[in-house]
Image (spheres, helix red, strand yellow):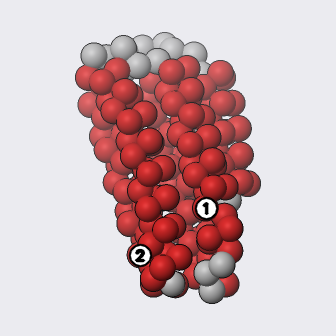
Amino acid sequence: MKVALLVLVVAVAAASTSLVKTKAVDWTAVEQELQVSYKIVGDSVVKLKELAIAGDKDIGGKIAEGITKVAKEGELLFEVILAAVADQTLTADQFGDYVIEVGKVWEKGIEDLQDLINSLPETVAEEMLQVFTDGSNAFQVIAVNILTLLSE
């Protein structure tokens, strides 16, 4: 899971520093992309919690609680970004910082849950890793789209 986060952070950092703003930002498109990213992350959170609980009710319940805590931290960061979009003040650098911060929150959360996740049946842990990786990859694509929109 660390590899997916590292790839995301590096890609966003590179994109945010290499883009130069040349015209007005399409704020509606930025907001739409943010909403898509929010849905992808939300769907991933739900699937991760379902998998954890299906793997083992007791351990999975603890994992689900941890995932919920991490998701709430991410949601607080997301609200700040939405406010900046509503005010039309969000910059590519600020969004890049947001993505990096979200990555750190998820990395720490997953690290904190790693022992519990490892105690699940191997197939469940692998499926959770795949859901996390797929969600991270989709989020990465959207993050780059948003950075591009903010930098046009």
Q: Amino acid at mark 1?
A: Leu
Q: Compared with residue 84, is residue 131 higher up or lower down, i.e. above or below?
A: below
Q: Position of residue 137 (x, y in %)?
A: 57, 55
Q: Position of residue 66 (x, y in %)?
A: 49, 58
Whole-number angstrom distance, CA of label 1 to CA of label 2:
15 Å
Q: Residue at x 51, y 84 (%)?
A: 56
Q: Compared with residue 118, is residue 110 higher up or lower down, i.e. above or below?
A: above
Q: Residue at x 38, y 41 (%)?
A: 75
Compare residues 111 and 74 and report the one nearer the observer. Answer: 111
Q: Position of residue 97 (x, y in %)?
A: 56, 26
142 on left or right of 1: left
- Placement of the N terminus among the 4 image quadrants: bottom right
Q: Is residue 48 visible?
A: no
Q: Compared with residue 139, is residue 44 higher up or lower down, i.e. above or below?
A: below
Describe the element under mark 1 as helix, strand or loop.
Answer: helix
Q: Nearer the viewer, mark 1 or mark 2?
A: 1
Describe the element under mark 2 as helix, strand or loop.
Answer: helix
Q: Quadrant of residue 128?
A: bottom right
Q: Residue at x 67, y 84 (%)?
A: 122
Q: Amino acid at mark 2?
A: Glu
Q: Compared with residue 103, is residue 31 higher up or lower down, i.e. above or below?
A: above
Q: Residue at x 66, y 78 (%)?
A: 119
Q: Position of residue 79 (x, y in %)?
A: 33, 32
Compare residues 45 and 14 and report the one nearer the observer. Answer: 45
Q: How many marks?
A: 2
Of mark 1 and mark 2, the one earlier in the sequence is: 2
- For residue 50, which numbered disc appears in the image? 2
**Callouts 1 and 2 close, C-beta under 8 Å:** no
- For residue 113, which numbered disc appears in the image? 1
Mark 2 surroundings within 10 Å by alpha-carbon count, few (fewer than 14), some (14 through 19), many (20 or more): some
Q: Is residue 106 visible?
A: yes
9 on left or right of 32: right
